[in-house]
């Protein structure tokens, strides 16, 4: 009986109380995850099927090589 009561209270908290608190909060903003950062910075790979991605990979590789030589 106690377990049912505790489960019910926890459910009410997460189903009713938490959404109300989150709606009232104005500081909630989604953050970028690691995968989204990877996709934005991805230039392709030497084994890519698309010619544009291969060219993009080669350009990024040359930029990195030139940047390493300047240091």
Image (cartoon, rainbow, N blue to C red):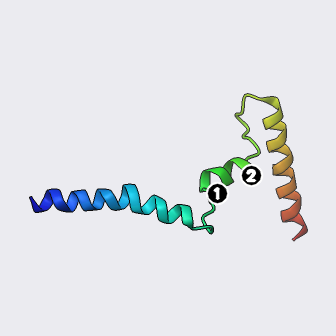
For mark 2, what is the residue?
A: 41
From this view, report whether residue 51 is shown above or below residue 65: above
Q: Quadrant of the C terminus?
A: bottom right
Most extreme residue toward the left is 1
Q: Position of residue 27 (x, y in %)?
A: 62, 69
Q: For the residue carrying disc 2, how many other residues have a C-alpha within 10 Å: few (<14), some (14-19), or many (20+)?
A: few
Along the line of sight, which residue is nearer the eye, 9 or 29?
9
Q: Position of residue 23 (x, y in %)?
A: 55, 61
Q: Position of residue 4 (x, y in %)?
A: 15, 56
Residue 25 appears in which quarter of the rendering?
A: bottom right
Q: For the residue carrying disc 1, how many other residues have a C-alpha within 10 Å: few (<14), some (14-19), or many (20+)?
A: few
Q: Position of residue 15 (x, y in %)?
A: 38, 55
Q: Secondary structure at mark 2?
A: helix
For mark 1, what is the residue?
A: 32
Along the line of sight, which residue is nearer the eye, 65 or 41?
41
| Rendered residue at 23%/57% (across/down) | 8
Q: Is residue 3 left or right of residue 60?
A: left
Is there a contact, CB below 8 Å, between mark 1 and mark 2? no
| Rendered residue at 28%/61% (across/down) | 10
Q: Nearer the viewer, mark 1 or mark 2?
A: 1
């Amino acid at each position: 009986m106690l377990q049912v009561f505790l489960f019910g209270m926890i459910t009410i908290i997460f189903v009713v109380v938490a959404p109300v608190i989150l709606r009232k909060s104005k500081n909630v903003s989604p953050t970028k995850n690691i995968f989204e950062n990877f996709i934005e910075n991805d230039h392709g790979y030497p084994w890519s099927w698309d010619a544009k991605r291969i060219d993009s990979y080669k350009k990024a590789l040359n930029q990195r090589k030139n940047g390493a030589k300047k240091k």
